[in-house]
């Protein structure tokens, strides 16, 4: 566990900062759409912000997987296909903590848990701002952001995508040419040279 955090702490921090930056961007778009009083625009900008966030995750975790591919094939590192999932889980730890605060505020009616829930909901609006537009949509007579369980679901797409994309990088499988700029060409040449020697 200590070695894992040592090897991937920078990636976890970068993933969290990518989320935070995209959340601010998405929150700003949601505010602008709110002023325009257009649910269609609000949903469209929220979807756009979410897709942008997922694309950042996609390219980042593919790069991590490809970087590890070199170490795995050279025998310097064991193959661990769930690495992308664990990195994303660690990067989303704040989101799950906020979800717990919101759950406690909703299920336990005390002044402390109420305050905790309010703080959690406010912080979630900032840290998960790319979802704000979609969470304003009513479901079952109330907006989605009024259901505490929703906040436990929000990090799941990022975690699943990170798990899948890490393995794509580990296998050097890519679907768009956009990934080429994220591949370290020196490592690629080193890997090809090792294959030729075999």
Image (tube, rainbow, N blue to C red):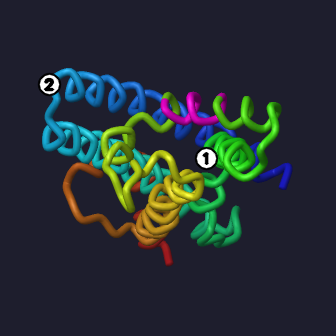
Quadrant that contains the N terminus: bottom right
Quarter of the image holding residue 84?
bottom right
Residue visible at 36% across and 59% down?
139
Q: Which mark identifies residue 132?
A: none
Return the residue at label 1. Answer: 92
Mark found first going from the N terminus, 1 or 2? 2
Classify mark 1: helix, strand or loop.
loop
Most foreground residue, 113 or 69: 113
**Residue 119 visible, this angle:** yes
Q: CA distance from mark 1 to mark 2?
A: 31 Å
Which percent across, then down, holds residue 173? Answer: 34, 69
Q: Position of residue 68 (x, y in %)?
A: 57, 58
| Res 73 → quadrant | bottom right
Residue interval drawn in magenta: 119-125
Picture residue at 39% right of the left edge, 33% below the top: 22
Residue 55 shown left or right of residue 78 in the figure: left
Q: Residues within 10 Å of mark 2 (few under 14, many from 20)?
A: few
Is 81 placed above or below 189 here?
below
**Which of the two discs, 1 and 2, sits closer to the camera?**
2
Relative to 117, say whether 166 is above or below: below
Q: Is residue 123 left or right of residue 24?
A: right
Compared with 79, 58 (above or below) is above
Disc number at residue 36? 2
Q: Residue furthest right?
A: 2
Is 70 in front, or is 91?
91
- Asked if one can make out residue 181 in the rendered structure from this viewpoint, the answer is no
């Amino acid at each position: 566990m200590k070695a894992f955090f040592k090897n991937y702490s920078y990636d976890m921090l970068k993933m969290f900062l990518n989320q935070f930056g995209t959340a601010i961007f998405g929150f700003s778009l949601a505010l602008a759409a709110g002023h325009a009083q257009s649910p269609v625009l609000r949903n469209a900008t929220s979807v756009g912000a979410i897709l942008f966030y997922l694309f950042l995750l996609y390219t980042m975790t593919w790069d991590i997987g490809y970087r590890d591919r070199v170490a795995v094939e050279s025998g310097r590192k064991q193959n661990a296909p769930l690495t992308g999932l664990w990195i994303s889980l660690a990067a989303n730890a704040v989101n799950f903590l906020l979800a717990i605060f919101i759950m406690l505020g909703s299920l336990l009616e005390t002044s402390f848990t109420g305050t905790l829930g309010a703080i959690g909901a406010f912080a979630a609006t900032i840290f998960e701002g790319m979802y704000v537009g979609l969470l304003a949509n009513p479901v079952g007579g109330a907006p989605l952001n009024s259901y505490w369980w929703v906040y436990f679901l929000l990090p799941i797409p990022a975690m699943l995508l990170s798990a899948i994309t890490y393995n794509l990088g580990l296998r050097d499988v890519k679907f768009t040419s956009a990934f080429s700029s994220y591949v370290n060409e020196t490592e690629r040449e080193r890997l090809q040279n090792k294959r030729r020697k075999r």
